[in-house]
Amino acid sequence: MREYTVIDTLKDTLKRAEKIVFLTGAGISQESGIGTFRGNDGLWEKYDPMKLASAQAFRDDPRLVWRWYNDRRRKIMAVKPNPGHMAIASLQSHRQVWVLTQNIDGLHHGAGSREVIELHGNIFATKCTTCDFKGKIRDEFPDRPPSCKICGSNLRPDVVWFGEGIKREVWNQAIIHSMSCDAMIIVGASLAVSPANTLPLYAKNIKATLIEVNPENTPLSNEMDFSIRKTAVDALPKILSIFESLN
Ligand code: APR
Ligand code: ZN
């Protein structure tokens, strides 16, 4: 008798789900070779996050912070979306899919996901520290922050730093999708950082099914309808195959 696994019980739920929202964190990019923040392979191991990922740190030493982001951009440009990112992108041909990601690496776009909300911004975007100029940077790694073409001030990465809030219009969109989905699949997020960690509760409030894909427990594991203790690359292609088998 075949073991009746979590994935099987998931089948009925997913069959009925029309709109699926993914909430992803650094864990989904881990198997692409990008360290997570709080894991033991963590990015933060080598750097003190409060030293580098904050507006104060950038004011104190713009070159140091800028060079750290150069280093992170180089690392991200050297990796590719993994089968976890690809499975989420392929799901778009079976269901309405939105991706709310805490990641700034752009790998969901790289995998072909079309509806992606980058809660914490994107490492390849820049913004002026003074005026509202916004830009992009990819294959260049200047040793110091570039100057704004409009006002001459330093540009900075257009990402959400510690102590900064998620942009209002981005947050409103994230809530709208969390409150109008049939299932929310949380992948590779420690749910240690607010307000992103409140999004599953918005979904739960409207009786959406909560599914967690994470090898470890999180503070919201008890709120989940299903906890799949597997990695993104193990679990997401299997979840995709459930939808493919439904057609
Ligand atoms: N597959 C799935 N999950 C994984 C994998 C994997 N291969 N590897 C690790 N994980 C899980 C870990 O168990 C952990 O719960 O991914 C999670 C990663 O957690 P964090 O490192 O805290 O990353 P994240 O949740 O994205 O952090 C949120 O905090 O530091 C800020 O702005 C930063 O966006 C980041 C936010
Ligand atoms: Zn400017």
Image (cartoon, rainbow, N blue to C red):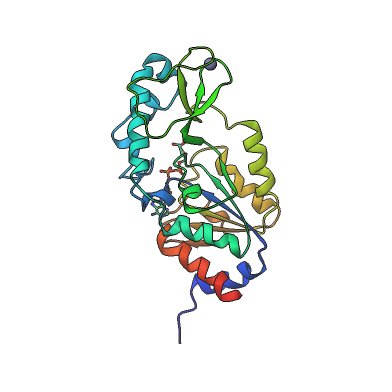
Horizontal and vertical percent for residue 212?
A: 51, 57
Eyeballing the image, is 5 above or below 173? below
Most distant residue in the bottom direction: 1
Q: Residue at the location (61% across, 45% down)?
A: 199
Q: Quadrant of residue 20?
A: bottom right
- Name the residue rendered at 70%, 52% in the picture: 180
Q: Position of residue 233 (x, y in %)?
A: 41, 60
Front residue (pair 212, 146): 146
In this orientation, does residue 156 appear?
Answer: yes
Residue depicted at x 50% and y 38%? 193
Please state, as top left, top right, bottom left or bottom right, where the N terminus lies in the image.
bottom left
Q: Is residue 225 visible?
A: no
How many labels sit on residues?
0
**Residue 31, horizontal then vertical, whole percent:** 36, 53
Image quarter of the C terminus? bottom right
Q: Residue at x 54, y 71 (%)?
A: 242
Image coords of residue 63 (percent x, y): 35, 19
Left or right of 51, for residue 165: right
